[in-house]
Image (spheres, rainbow, N blue to C red):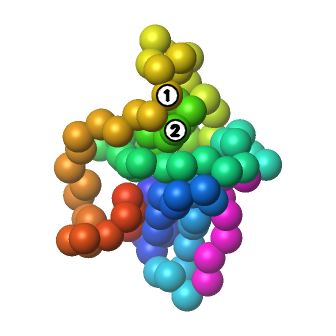
Amino acid sequence: MATKGTILVGTIGQGVMMSSDDGESWSRASVRVGMHSDAIVKTLLPDPRRPATVYAGTDLGLYQTDDGGGTWRLCDTPMKSVGNITPVLSHRRAWPGSSPAWHS
């Protein structure tokens, strides 16, 4: 994440929800900024070398943000036509039993 205290949560049908204040308030980070409005986010993965870059595996393909969740773009990958991306990932700070989430 770009700033400490930012939380991104993948949802079923709401895209990515974002909090920049450790969960005090939330907004839909993905809608109208690149991700389809009813996205089913199966996983989130931060890039360990680029803190503001996060990947989202969704029902329609792999999305990427380079600004900590501000804007998203569908990656041009061979997996784009496959859909339903559910990679096996380990999260640096994830909560047991939770939906895909990332907290800086």
The x and y percentages for residue 76 are 55, 17
Q: Which residue is mark 2?
A: 59
Residues rendered magenta in the picture: 25-31
Seen from the viewer's position, the closer of residues 4 and 70 is 70
- Relative placement, left or right, of 61 versus 51 is right
Earlier residue among tags 2 and 1: 2
- Relative placement, left or right, of 34 versus 84 is right
Q: Secondary structure at mark 1?
A: loop
The x and y percentages for residue 57 are 44, 39
Q: Secondary structure at mark 2?
A: loop
Seen as rendered, the residue at the extreme right is 32
Crowdedness of circle 1 by 10 Å Cα count: few (<14), some, many (20+)? few
- Spatial CA distance of label 2 from label 1 is 5 Å
Q: Amino acid at mark 2?
A: Asp
Q: Residue at x 48, y 16 (%)?
A: 77
The C terminus lies in which quarter of the figure? Answer: bottom left
Vertical position of residue 84 compared to residue 8: above or below: above
Question: CB of mark 2 within 8 Å of CB of mark 1?
Answer: yes
The N terminus lies in which quarter of the figure? Answer: bottom left
Vertical position of residue 64 compared to residue 95: above or below: above
Residue 69 shows in this picture: no
Q: Residue at x 46, y 68 (%)?
A: 7
Q: Is residue 29 magenta?
A: yes
Crowdedness of circle 2 by 10 Å Cα count: few (<14), some, many (20+)? some
- Relative placement, left or right, of 1 versus 98 is right
The secondary structure that dominates the magenta segment is loop
Q: Which residue is mark 1?
A: 83
